[in-house]
Image: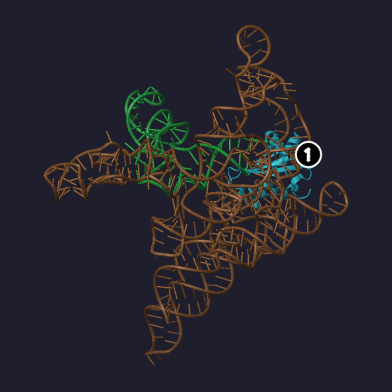
Chain colours: A cyan, B brown, C green
RNA sequence: CAAGUAAAUCGCCUUAUCGCUCAAAUUUUAAUUUGGGAGGAAAGUCCGAACACCGUAGUGCAAUAUAGUGGUUAACGGCCACCAGUCGUGAGGCUAGGACAAGUGCAACAGAAAGUAUGUACAGGUAAUGCUGUAGUGAAACCAGGUAAACUCUAUAUGGUGCAAUGCUAUGUAAACCAGCGCCCAUUUGGUAAAGGCUGCACGCUUGAUGCUGGAGGGUAAGCAGCUAAAGUGUAUUGGUAACAGUGCACUCAGAUAAAUGAUAAGGGCUUUUUGUUUUUUAUGGAUUUUUUUAUAAAAAAUAAGACGUACAGAAUUCGGCUUAUAGAUUUGCUUGACCA
RNA sequence: GGCUCCAUAGUUCAAGGGAUAGAACAAAAGUUUCCUAAACUUUAGAUCCAAGUUCGAAUCUUGGUGGAGUCA
């Protein structure tokens, strides 16, 4: 699994996103909240991910774009650590809950924690 | 040199690694190579257009916008020039800058009186009188005025909706169901009918029974086109006071859609500031007969090191403007003041 | 992305261009009560921001800020 984040790996379908928000589960590590739902994909991608920043906390499009870019970058660089040996495919949506503009090292460390927590909860549900 | 004013321009850069997106080519169906990839405001959506669809026999009335004169333009409420007013010592800035000699309205408080006009004090004058002037109130007052970013009048202009327009493909489906008004049948009546259309309204015209209105509900929210070569950009030159227009040459310069244009590391610019060193100038004091030497303080310049900062802001159909936000830097014209020659 | 609308006390609403900007509920203090509630008395509190027109602006005009709705 290469460290890429191309068009195919983005979560784009409005239908899927609606389903994700309605039926998905979530784990959160401040300032992130990860929603996930296991769904099959037709084009053979193991994970589709989207990011979102609230307009309530960041009025300017520049700030929102900056945070989304940081989040995508952190996801791209770290996803190989956690997803190389998963069997089912997932749809993800990562929400930014904070109110301040973050720096990249902060985003990266918290993102790692978030996905560590996610893989723990996945294995727990499997065992049960 | 300082302060100001007007106009114009720029608005971080380089390298490495890892990525994103579009186009073309090559293999071939997911990779490789090459090339391109945010702004002066991309913002606000305030004007004006292009483009697309809907509508369009006609007449009248509304409604909205603009407002000195001339020019410019595809068009404009923009821009340019001039006139007038106003602010500023000045360079210059600002102006919704037609009409109250058609009609209607409005003017709190104060004041005799704000319109059906009226009469206080003082002075002047007369045969006599608010007949005349001044004071007092007020934003406005002795005879008529003020107010149109009050209605209005005058002149000019204007169909509506916006790329989530619109067309095609895919999926689903429903000329279904409920309520009301009609049609139909009987009586009367035989049309001058319910209702709709002419996208503000009326007249008028017209459609009109598998009809019209409302309710409740079903499906898709995927893909393609629209979509990026144009009132285009740069430059030279000609005409014009200028806005702008003509001609020649060169160039092709974003097209995403939970929405690309980024992340990390290193180095360098720029601004402000702190500290150290050196040099120059000025002031004060000490030593000295003088030359000279030295201490302290201030200012300027150069250099080294460190710290902080490096704005506003992200294309969404496309253009022309306007408005608003913006760290800082540069250039040019002009004005005022100070000093020197 | 386009279009449309709104903004007045803590809340819900008023107010013909004339100023002490009003009412109800809520809040605070007091009276009453053994205490609370109710009742009564009193108090404080606002025109989203900035310019312009006007003698005078919550009201008219322009620009900004914030909020809401709607369209495939």
Answer with left or right where residue B329 lies relative to residue B208.
left
Percent position of residue B75, x then y: 58, 49
Kind of element beneath mark 1? loop
- Looking at the image, can residue A17 be seen? yes
Residue under the point 71% across and 41% down: A92
Residue under the point 72% across and 43% down: A49
Residue under the point 72% across and 49% down: A76
Answer with left or right where residue C70 lies relative to residue A6.
left
> Image quarter for residue B185?
top right
Give the answer, above or below, for where B298 lies relative to C17.
below
- Looking at the image, can residue A62 be seen? no
Q: How many marks?
A: 1
Percent position of residue B337, x then y: 39, 70
Quarter of the picture containing the C terminus of chain A is: top right
Percent position of residue C58, x then y: 42, 40
Give the answer, above or below, for where B235 lies relative to A89.
below
* Chain on which label 1 sits: A
> Image quarter for residue B109?
top left
Give the answer, above or below, for where C23 lies relative to B184.
below
Residue under numbered circle 1: A41
Answer with left or right where residue B96 lies relative to residue B238.
left
Instruction: Rate crowding at label 1 as few (under 14), some (14 to 19) or many (20 or more) other CA atoms within 10 Å.
Output: few
Percent position of residue B226, x then y: 71, 45
Who is closer to the viewer here, B38 or B203?
A: B203
């Amino acid at each position: 699994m290469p460290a890429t984040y191309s068009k195919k790996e983005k979560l784009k379908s409005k239908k899927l996103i609606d389903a994700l928000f309605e039926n998905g589960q979530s784990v959160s590590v401040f300032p992130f909240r990860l929603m996930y739902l296991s769904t099959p994909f037709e084009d053979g991608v193991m994970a589709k991910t989207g990011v979102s920043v609230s307009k309530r906390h960041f009025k300017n499009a520049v700030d929102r774009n900056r945070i989304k870019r940081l989040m995508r970058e952190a996801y791209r660089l770290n996803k190989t650590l956690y997803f190389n040996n998963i069997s089912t495919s997932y749809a993800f949506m990562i929400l930014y809950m904070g109110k301040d503009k973050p720096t990249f090292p902060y985003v990266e460390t918290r993102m790692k924690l978030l996905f560590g927590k996610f893989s723990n909860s996945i294995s727990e549900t499997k065992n049960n």
